[in-house]
Image (cartoon, grey):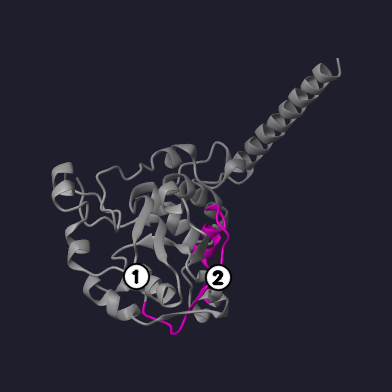
């Protein structure tokens, strides 16, 4: 009898919670008319966050064959086999990053969501983005010891008020260690052509005093977007100089150099 009563009580509590949420959604929709941060359509359920379910559902994963190093899609399985599953750029360049993955391509709803987090201060988006990173980057996270967010320069952090990479790192399921610091304020990578990005961030990062936690460890670098991978690579070199055995990278989005 007690067990049956508990079940009834839980059911009633769930019903009350759903009823309260329904009323709250209705009131917010009428009073504030909030719009989706990605598609700008009116939100049916604003209590569930600033992005609608349709936009979240439109974010497709990057599917194999992928470059084993940077995670870029490869044109075909035949090329992947012949090239040892590496894209042309990763075969040409020496990479400090051992493996990298992202939720999906930096376009559509995912691009708008990242922008809403990074530039509009919608920090509540870090949690669902981080959960997606944890799910789709499970192979990157497996066996890793810590997550290290890519740092902002102190002046840029003061301007923005937060570091989006740190917010994301808190939700990927690993202990977060701020093991890196930025030595100088560099020009925004987004404003530079690809050929200049590696030079812009060369030797721009160093290991902090808590770098002792890096010794012999597998580390996952976390950031919002990977374009050429220059920033991630510069961070990885600093981490390996500090004793990390392996450095992987996990980002919310990736700018694709080619599409299938």
Provide residue 161's location: percent of width, then percent of height: 57, 71
Mark drawn on residue 41: none
Q: Is residue 22 visible?
A: yes
Q: Is residue 17 left or right of residue 231?
A: right
Q: From the viewer's perspective, is residue 204 above or below residue 33?
A: below
- Image quarter for residue 64? top left
From the image, tell me which residue sits under label 1: 233
Q: Main secondary structure of the magenta part?
A: loop
Residue corresponding to mark 2: 213
The mark nearer the N terminus, 2 or 1, is 2
Specify the quadrant that holds the N terminus: top right
- The front one of 9 and 124 is 9
Q: Which residues are magenta?
A: 159-187
Q: What residue is shown at x 50% (from left), y 45% (from top)?
A: 51
Indicate left or right for 4 with 221 as reference: right
Q: Report the residue at 80% width, 24% height from top.
A: 9
* Image location (x, y in percent) of residue 159: 53, 76
Magenta-drawn stretch contains 162: yes
Residue 248 lies left or right of residue 68; in this view the side is right
Residue 119 shows up from this direction: no
Q: CA distance from mark 2 to mark 1?
A: 20 Å
Is 172 rendered above or below residue 76?
A: below
Say few, some or many: other residues with alpha carbon within 10 Å of mark 2 (under 14 / 14 to 19 / 20 or more).
Answer: some
In the foreground, 103 or 249: 249
Q: Nearer the viewer, residue 223 or 217?
A: 217
Across and down, in percent, residue 198 comes to 29, 75
Q: Assess whether residue 125 is covered by the magenta stretch.
A: no
């Amino acid at each position: 009898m007690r067990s049956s009563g508990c079940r009834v009580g839980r059911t009633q509590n769930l019903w009350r919670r759903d009823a309260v949420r329904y009323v709250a959604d209705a009131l917010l929709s009428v009073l504030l008319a909030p719009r989706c941060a990605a598609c700008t359509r009116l939100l049916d359920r604003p209590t569930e966050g600033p992005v609608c379910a349709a936009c979240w559902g439109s974010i497709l994963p990057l599917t194999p064959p992928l470059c084993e190093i940077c995670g870029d899609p490869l044109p075909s399985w035949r090329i992947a086999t012949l090239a040892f599953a590496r894209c042309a750029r990763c075969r040409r360049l020496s990479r400090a990053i051992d493996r990298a993955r992202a939720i999906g391509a930096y376009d559509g709803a995912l691009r708008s969501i990242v922008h809403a987090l990074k530039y509009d201060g919608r920090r509540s988006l870090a949690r669902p983005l981080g959960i997606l990173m944890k799910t789709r980057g499970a192979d990157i996270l497996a066996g890793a010891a810590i997550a290290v967010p890519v740092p902002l320069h102190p002046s840029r952090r003061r301007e923005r008020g937060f570091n989006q990479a740190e917010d994301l790192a808190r939700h990927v399921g690993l202990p977060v260690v701020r093991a890196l610091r930025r030595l100088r304020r560099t020009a925004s990578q987004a404003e530079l052509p690809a050929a200049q990005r590696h030079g812009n961030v060369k030797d721009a990062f160093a290991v902090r005093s808590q770098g002792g936690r890096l010794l012999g460890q597998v580390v996952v670098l976390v950031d919002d977007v990977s374009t050429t991978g220059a920033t991630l690579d510069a961070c990885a070199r600093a981490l390996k100089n500090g004793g990390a055995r392996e450095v992987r990278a996990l980002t919310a989005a990736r700018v694709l150099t080619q599409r299938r």
